[in-house]
Amino acid sequence: MTECVLGVDLGTSSVKVTAVSRTGEIIAQEGMDFPLQQPQPGYAEQDPEDWVSAATVSIVRLILKDKLTPDQIVGISYSGQMHGLVLLDDNNEVLRPAMLWNDTRSTQQRQEIMAKMGSRFVDITHNKPLEGFTLPKLLWVKENQPEIFQNAKTMLLPKDYLRFRMTGQLAIDYSDATGTVMFDVDKQQWSKEILDAFDIPETICPPLVRSIDETGNINEWYAEYSGLSTHTKTFGGGADNACGAVGAGIDGPTKVLSSIGTSGVILKYEPEKETNYDGVIQYEDHAIPNAYYSMGVTLAAGFSLSWFKKTFAENEDFTAVVDSAAKSTVGANGLLFAPYIVGERAPYADADIRGSFIGIDGIHQRHDFVRAVLEGIIFSFRDILDLYEAKGNQFETVISIGGGAKSPLWQQIQANIFNVKVVSLQNEQGPGLGAAMLAAVGLGWYHDIPECAKTFIQFKDVFLPEPDNVEKYRQLHQIYRKIYPSTKEITHELVDFRRDHQR
């Protein structure tokens, strides 16, 4: 019998469960989609029960369809969409739909936080309180649904709720705790100063665990529900971006992760917690114990591409649509796209900016628009790299995961816009593999995550910068950087107009 661990990756639109052997072999994988509710512009909610159902269906399929035996599955760990707010009452029942990372309704609360605490807040958390983070959402509930807030006894993040349903134990790991912006990074504990400032009881914050720490066995209820064994151990897990970094081998300061999912991330390993980017770039505890990472987020990376396909090529093959960009040119024949279609986070913390196609000409065809979308997403990543390089950071390798690693054309665009080597992974499983590695280390299969990475991670394709195209993209990026300041006022007025006329 081949023992394995499960990496449960709870994303924004689906869950994916990956079974991995002690030698890093992907034995089997199952997944299931679940819906997103957007009852009003700026709202993004999910029913936490949908996460439990989707994860359970995936596990049942692993047992019934892929013939894994319950005794084979010795450990489970988790990767989860960050920042989401799940509120439980004193019976640990869910009080309201979960508010997700891409829910931007809490602009007023973000402003209240900064008005009350200002730079002191950034000093404590190393982050600014953006709408996507957990604290502004919690304050929104407190101010707009006070009866729910009064009944709230525990706050969890999405993957921690899923783990709670499997084990009956409440916990949150350090990487997701930093993403709540209720956490003191320097002291490595919940910030009493922040909680007191906003009259939030400290008891609402769950116990802290490391990502590799045991968090209880599968309980009898969930064993009966899923077919798992009560001997299976669970482990803390981590935020999806932290797990993605673990699963991609980001183990030093000269490597950068380029991750294109629904959102997009440029992520850098940080060896010391003293680094502070003044909140412009997020700063988090890593899933690797006693390490940190920073990241800049583009809110609508892969989402921009999926939006374009759904709107303009709904019944066509996704890969074919992406590949059609090769018919265009560097710079999409003079067409630029700014991927701000749900607001933006870095380097512009602006929930009300909106996307743009700039330079539309009568000669343009659909493949030019596809090319512009691909390039615009990577230009937004280049903005983030510019922030790092301004602090003196230099990079040798970009490790590309997610949607950007599935297209050779898109990887070459990254190499040219970044002007560094871009590599992809042989067994690219993103955060799910990172979660499985946390379980493998937690079980004692490996001494630590770097040792595990030597077995679990192999690199595949390499894309080198093309000097002529590097220069073209350098010039284009200078033009792209003018889009935000040039369109900010216009798009804010359009957003206000729509809000006023939807009332």
Image (cartoon, helix red, strand yellow):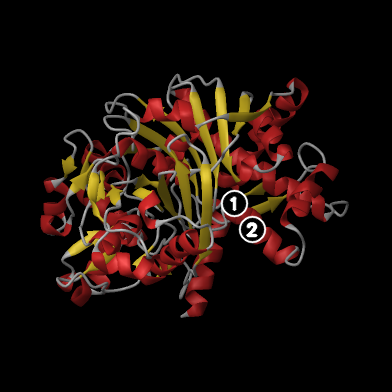
What residue lies at 23% left-to-right and 60% top-to-bottom?
155
Which residue is pictured at 29% across the width and 61% down the height?
166
Instruction: Give the camera-side residue of 474 and 367.
Output: 367
Give percent across and percent down for residue 339. Answer: 60, 50
- Residue type, numbered disc 2: Ser
- Residue at mark 2: 306
Identify the element where label 1 is drawn: helix
Distance from the alpha carbon under mark 2 to that under mark 1 = 6 Å
Name the residue rendered at 28%, 64% in the picture.
165
Tag on residue 214?
none
Disc 2 crowd rating (10 Å Cα; few below 14, some 14-19, many 20+) is: some
Does residue 140 appear in the picture of this structure? no
Please give the residue where the numbered disc 1 appears in the rendered image: 302
Crowd tier of the residue under label 1, counting other residues whose Cα lies within 10 Å: few below 14, some 14–19, many 20 or above: many
Q: Tell me residue 414's x, y (percent).
A: 65, 34
Of residues 306 and 226, the one drawn nearer to the viewer in this rendering: 226
Q: Position of residue 358 (x, y in %)?
A: 71, 49
What's the residue type where badge 1 is placed? Gly
Between 270 and 143, the one nearer to me in the picture: 270
On screen, residue 219 above or below 404 = below
The residue at the far bottom in this view is: 503
In the rendered structure, the answer to whether residue 235 lies left or right of residue 34 reads left
Determine the residue positioned at 18% across, 55% down.
205
Residue 185, placed above or below residue 7? above
Residue at the extreme right: 363
Q: Are marks 2 and 1 in contact (CB under 8 Å)?
A: yes
Quadrant of res 167: bottom left
Q: How many marks?
A: 2
